[in-house]
Amino acid sequence: MESMCRNELGYHPVNVYLNITCALCYVYTFHSADQATYPLTYFHDGFLTHHSDNASDLYLPTAFDRSSPVYAAGFPATVSGGEGGAESDHDAQLWRDCCQAAADCCVDQLKAAKHDSNQTSRSNGSHHNHPSSAEGLSVRECPMTWDGWQCWARTGKGETAQGSCPRYINPVSSQVCSPGFPEKKCTEDGSWFRLESLDEFDGNFSKEWTNYTSCFNLTPLEHRYQMQLISYCISISFLVPALLIFWRCKKLRVQRNMIHLNFFLSLFMYAVALIVLQTTITHKLFESSNAPEAYAAADSSAGIEQCRLSYVLTIYLRLCNYGWMFCEGLFLLRHLKHVFMQEQRFYLYTGGGWGLPAIPVAIYIYMRSEDSG
């Protein structure tokens, strides 16, 4: 009966498993971090192909053969004429380390399966995703598996396994790596935690997920996020009195002050929109470093739509800031050239400040919707 090894996609024959895991090692380690420098992406059945839609060349992930075409195609910025420099050697070594770790995980799985077969009468089975040898096991614990970066031992249901951060986890931005402890949760039904997500090409999908956020130092981003919130709160505290003064004092309601009022209003609305975006979307992503359920909520269909709406609104209001800056400058220029000119109809300024920014935003929405299908 054919030996099977397990990764995040399910059970596979050993040769297929080795190709799939090595291909995904490249994708997770390099392509996901920098698609321009590392252009290959996962195709299926363990093959790599170019990221572009019209690419037809397929490459086997032969990480241990430096003369393989996959190196020239997968590392074009670091490989020249088949001879790589120090950076190329470093990338190749990281890829080999990941592939070797996946192979070692398969060996451990086969040893564990052999040990089980010697102690029980269960067969190994041959189903692709749920072999019979794992049916009894899954009732009480999650099976040993490879998650794309490292091997996870069997874990009791309802427990959370803890691992270490592999050195090849993020070579493109190695400065943000930290000695954290990734976690993988075994649910109460004896299966690894799965992330329900939305892919712009494949639609809804469910995939086993490991929490690697502790492997990345998010402190600078969190500080930036906190300082941004404080700065915009201070801006709002100054804008609110200014808006009230312009609105309550009727003597100030002349055209130039109405332009000021709309400019301040656009600044106020942008600050509020940005705070809402940061507290409802960004904050959830920081929370996910401790709770995979929080990441799942932020990455759900509703969460993605909320993020898109908030982001588009933020872009529009930011452009309105510049629109009203333009109106301020236009008003000043016209009165410098024509001191005694009569005031222009205000709806022209309103169209420039609130209307014109909607045009590039509409184009942006259309282009992004075309890209995502």
Image: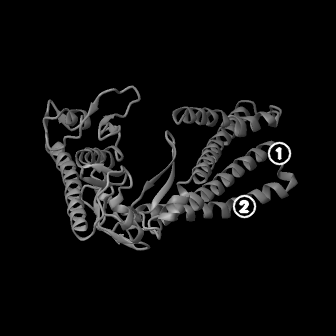
Residue 149 percent location from the top left of the image: 29, 56
Badge 2: how crowded within 10 Å, few (<14), some, or many (20+)? few
Q: Give the SS element for disc 1.
A: loop
Q: Quadrant of residue 47?
A: top left
- Which amino acid, mark 1? Val
Reading the image, the residue beneath label 1 is: 254
Q: Is label 1 or label 2 in front?
A: 2
Residue 61 — which label? none
What separation in Å lies between label 1 and label 2 (alpha carbons)? 19 Å
- Which amino acid, mark 2? Val
203, above or below 220, in the image: above
Q: Quadrant of residue 54?
A: top left
Please indicate whether residue 227 sits to the left or right of residue 237 in the image.
left
Q: Quadrant of residue 41?
A: top left
Residue 355 percent location from the top left of the image: 72, 36
Q: Residue at x 19, y 43 (%)?
A: 63
Residue lying at the far right in this picture: please name it. Answer: 250
198, above or below 289, in the image: above
Residue 265 percent location from the top left of the image: 72, 51
Please indicate whether residue 91 sits to the left or right of residue 245 in the image.
left
Please indicate whether residue 290 sits to the left or right of residue 338 in the image.
left
Badge 1: how crowded within 10 Å, few (<14), some, or many (20+)? few
Q: Residue at x 76, y 43 (%)?
A: 256
Which residue occupies the foreground of this view, 313 or 348? Answer: 313
Does any portion of residue 148 appear in the rendered image? no
Residue 143 percent location from the top left of the image: 34, 64
Please indicate whether residue 69 sits to the left or right of residue 297 in the image.
left
105, above or below 347, in the image: below
Reading the image, the residue beneath label 2 is: 240
Which residue occupies the foreground of this view, 371 or 65? Answer: 65
